[in-house]
Image (spheres, rainbow, N blue to C red):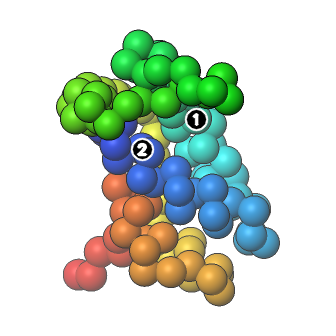
């Protein structure tokens, strides 16, 4: 399946939140497998982001590199291009009903993970 890096970044927020909650082994396995597929892409994205900060940034008095205000737009434009990049991941959709066991899944979590969820078909 094809995803943008932005979609993976958004989904990872919900995944990080729920992956440590108690759940049955089937859902735990599916989420762990999904996390293992997403993580390398997000690590690569972070490396590119850091390289861009080094390229456009300036070291401050505390030896931290920060993008100055006059370069924020350039940084935003460049990182947006990267986030729009598409990657192909071999992932299985996770049936939505497996999440029913989790007591603390918010609508935002579902929205963030929805690209990986398979809705139950009503016939």
Q: Quadrant of the N terminus?
A: top left
Marks 2,1: beta carbons within 8 A: no
Vertical arrangement, residue 60 with respect to residue 15, above or below: above
Task: Please indicate whether residue 14 sits to the left or right of residue 20 in the image.
Answer: left
Q: Measure the C-alpha gap from mark 2 to mark 1.
A: 9 Å
Give the number of callouts: 2
Q: Position of residue 118 (x, y in %)?
A: 38, 63
- Side (left or right) of 32 relative to 112: right
Quarter-wise, where is residue 60 in the image? top right
Residue at 37% across, 69% down: 111
In depth, the one of 65 and 83 nearer the eye is 65
On screen, residue 17 above or below 61:
below
Helix, strand or loop under label 2: helix
Q: Residue 112, percent across and down?
A: 41, 62
Q: Residue at x 65, y 86 (%)?
A: 103
Report crowding for label 2: few under 14, some 14 to 19, many 20 or more residues within 10 A (C-alpha): many
What is the quadrant of the C terminus in the image? bottom left
Disc marking residue 8 = 2
Report the residue at 22% width, 35% height from top: 73
Q: Please provide percent x and percent y for residue 20.
A: 75, 62
Q: Secondary structure at mark 1?
A: helix
Foreground residue among 56 and 29: 56
Q: Residues within 10 Å of mark 1 (few under 14, many from 20)?
A: some
Give x and y (percent) for residue 8: 42, 44
Q: In the current view of this chain or complex, which residue is farthest to the front?
A: 61
Q: Identify which residue, 83 or 57, lies in the foreground.
A: 57
For residue 39, the mark is 1
Question: Relative to 34, does residue 79 appear above or below in the rendering?
Answer: above
The answer to which of marks 2 and 1 sits earlier in the sequence is: 2
Residue 83 appears in the figure: no
In this picture, residue 59 sits left or right of residue 103: left
């Amino acid at each position: 399946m094809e995803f943008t890096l932005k979609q993976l970044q958004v989904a990872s927020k919900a995944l990080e939140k729920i992956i440590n909650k108690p759940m049955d082994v089937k859902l735990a396995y599916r989420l762990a497998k999904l996390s293992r597929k997403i993580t390398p892409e997000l690590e690569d994205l972070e490396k590119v982001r850091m390289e861009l900060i080094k390229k456009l940034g300036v070291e401050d008095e505390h030896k931290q590199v920060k993008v100055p205000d006059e370069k924020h737009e350039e940084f935003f434009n460049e990182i947006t291009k990267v986030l729009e990049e598409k990657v192909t991941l071999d992932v299985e959709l996770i049936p939505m009903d497996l999440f029913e066991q989790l007591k603390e899944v918010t609508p935002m979590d579902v929205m963030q993970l929805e690209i990986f969820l398979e809705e139950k078909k009503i016939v």
